[in-house]
Amino acid sequence: MRETKSSIFKLLIVISFTFGVFFLMPNFVKETHAEVAPCAVYGIHQMYPKNTATVKYEGTNINAITLGTMAKCVCGASIVYNGRPYSGGALGTYVTDPTPDFGAGGHFTYVASEENVMYSSSSHLPGYRFN
Ligand SMILES: [Zn+2]
């Protein structure tokens, strides 16, 4: 009788442990592996601020971002944003990989279609690191 109780107890421990792992795993996977890793060099882009940049809506003279910051990864990925992600602030309005506006004559001006102009109230963007 004692043996049986002991076995059931052990079985319960194994079951709760198994379920515990089962419930913890999705979060674990989400935290560590679910982030997109689009960078050919680092996996996740390491973005470094380069210069001030303005982004216009394609085919218009209207600024989507005025005097924002252009940050680049060594792989060539770029982003222009008007927030302060490096100090933990919101990214704000941002455009990834805007097209240089060659007509702007040496200024750091880019164009982007309206659907590529995004907003984030977070300082974090999946696939990108602002260090
Ligand atoms: Zn990259």
Image (cartoon, rainbow, N blue to C red):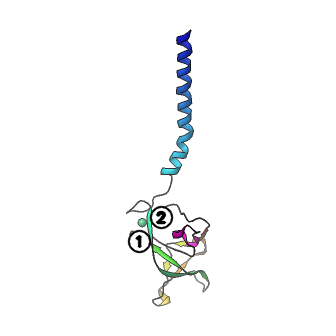
Magenta part of the chain: 76-94
Q: Is the residue marked 1 within 8 Å of ligand 1, measured from its CB?
A: yes
* Residue under the point 62% across and 84% down: 62
SS class, disc 2: strand
Dot 1 crowding, Cα within 10 Å, few <14, some 14–19, many 20+: few
Splitting the image into four quadrants, where does ligand 1 fall? bottom left
Name the quadrant containing residue 85: bottom right
Mark-to-mark CA distance, 2 and 1: 14 Å
Q: Position of residue 45 (x, y in %)?
A: 44, 64
Q: Residue 114, image x and y in percent? A: 61, 74
Residue type at tag 1: Gly
Tag of residue 76:
1
Q: Which residue is mark 2?
A: 129
Q: Residue at point 52% right, 12% down?
A: 3
Q: Secondary structure at mark 1?
A: loop
Q: Amino acid at mark 2?
A: Arg
Q: Residue furthest top?
A: 1
